[in-house]
């Protein structure tokens, strides 16, 4: 079963926890004084201090818990920085705040800059992969490599279904309608079923399916989570600026794509491999959209070899 955040906090109670404003945020952990900000929004983070820093950015819909198997594997050899993007997991979100990709990226960059020394390896899945790639704008000299699992790309964000969804949600009436529906039990169950059916490989053995469904059902009872889902969908078209950033990437990039991914097509990975000179694409059988949960042992081997 996916471990709840409370369990993770209990295990890492002696390590640094905190909250940080995003968009010109200030850390207010360890008596840091917050500076005035425009959005006054915060990002929850969890930091393990060791040596090299691995930064994990979770996919759309989920939170930092999806990296539990990687944290267990690498926590004794490397710094681990896990993030809950605004509105996801335990990071709070003002319900009047819109989640604009570049603004969040800038805030994530500030968290990384503040809490790491030396270079970092960015590890992201789906939406987290897009955020990882976009960080090259702010952290180019600090990034040692990118380890990406089915990252959201410009092409993926402009796929028919995502594009139409974003356009529809851009209207106030549509957004209000979805938010209202999401407060009832049935739509939450539908969200859970959709995520489970299309993003997780049906043959997986490591993940307890019912436990994952229960976790999602509880997670999406939070109004912040629903708002984050809606706002992120509305602004998927704003990821088109990634095309300008790809030429800036000079460090190694490993892209892993599940052969059975039903969320983003393998063709997006092939296009990304063509656009980034240092990128290498691996297509893996018996994996879908979240391979770090479906095949954690195999993914950990790939990551270990990549950072060796």
Image (cartoon, rainbow, N blue to C red):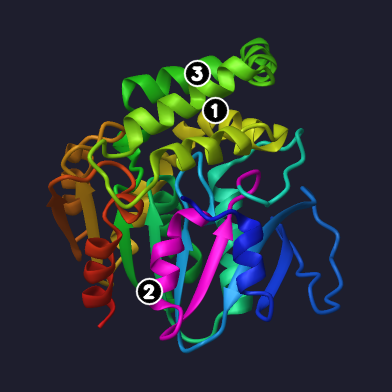
Magenta stretch contains residue 83 = yes
- Mark seen at residue 167: 3
User: For mark 1, does the 10 Å Cα neighbourhood hold few (<14), some (14 to 19), or many (20 or more) residues?
Assistant: many
Q: Which structural element holds mark 2? A: helix
Give residue 42's quadrant in the image: bottom right
- Mark seen at residue 29: none
Vertical position of residue 259 compared to residue 252: above or below: above
Vertical position of residue 221 compared to residue 86: above or below: above
User: Closer to the camera: disc 2 or disc 3?
Assistant: 2
Residues under labels 1 and 3: Cα distance?
Answer: 7 Å
Mark 1 or 3 closer to N-term? 3
Question: Which residue position holds label 2?
Answer: 73
**In screen coordinates, is 283 left or right of 212?**
left
Q: Residue visible at 32% across and 26% down? A: 159
Q: Which structural element holds mark 1? A: helix
User: For mark 2, does the 10 Å Cα neighbourhood hold few (<14), some (14 to 19), or many (20 or more) residues?
Assistant: some
Extent of the magenta region: 65-88
User: For mark 3, does the 10 Å Cα neighbourhood hold few (<14), some (14 to 19), or many (20 or more) residues?
Assistant: some
Residues under labels 2 and 3: Cα distance?
Answer: 41 Å
Mark 2 touching mark 3, by CB under 8 A?
Answer: no
Residue 36 locus on image (x, y percent):
86, 59
Residue 307 locus on image (x, y percent):
28, 78
Mark 2 or 1 closer to N-term? 2
**In screen coordinates, is 121 left or right of 14?**
left
């Amino acid at each position: 079963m996916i471990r709840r955040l409370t369990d993770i906090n209990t295990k890492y109670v002696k390590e640094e926890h905190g909250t940080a404003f995003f968009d010109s945020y200030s850390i207010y952990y360890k008596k840091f004084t917050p500076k005035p900000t425009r959005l006054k929004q915060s990002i929850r983070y969890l930091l393990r201090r060791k040596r090299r820093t691995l930064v994990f950015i979770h996919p759309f819909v989920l939170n930092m818990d999806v990296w539990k198997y990687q944290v267990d594997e690498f926590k004794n050899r490397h710094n681990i920085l896990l993030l809950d993007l605004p509105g996801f997991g335990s990071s709070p979100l003002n319900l009047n705040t819109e989640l604009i990709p570049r603004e969040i990226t800038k805030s994530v960059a500030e968290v990384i800059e503040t809490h790491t020394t030396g270079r970092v390896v960015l590890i992201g899945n789906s939406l987290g992969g897009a955020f990882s790639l976009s960080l090259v704008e702010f952290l180019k000299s600090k990034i040692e490599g990118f380890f990406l699992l089915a990252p959201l790309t410009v092409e993926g964000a402009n796929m028919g279904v995502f594009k139409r969804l974003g356009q529809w949600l851009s209207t106030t009436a549509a957004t209000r309608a979805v938010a209202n529906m999401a407060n009832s039990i049935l739509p939450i169950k539908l969200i859970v079923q959709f995520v489970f059916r299309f993003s997780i490989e049906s043959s997986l053995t490591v993940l307890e399916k019912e436990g994952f469904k229960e976790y999602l059902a509880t997670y999406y009872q939070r109004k912040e989570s629903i708002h984050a889902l809606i706002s992120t969908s509305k602004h998927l078209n704003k990821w088109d600026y990634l095309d300008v950033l790809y030429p800036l990437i000079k460090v190694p990039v490993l892209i892993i794509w599940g052969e059975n991914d039903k969320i983003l097509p393998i063709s997006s990975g092939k296009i990304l491999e063509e656009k980034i000179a240092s990128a290498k694409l691996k297509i893996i059988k018996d994996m879908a959209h979240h391979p770090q949960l479906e095949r954690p042992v195999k993914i950990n081997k790939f990551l270990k070899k990549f950072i060796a």
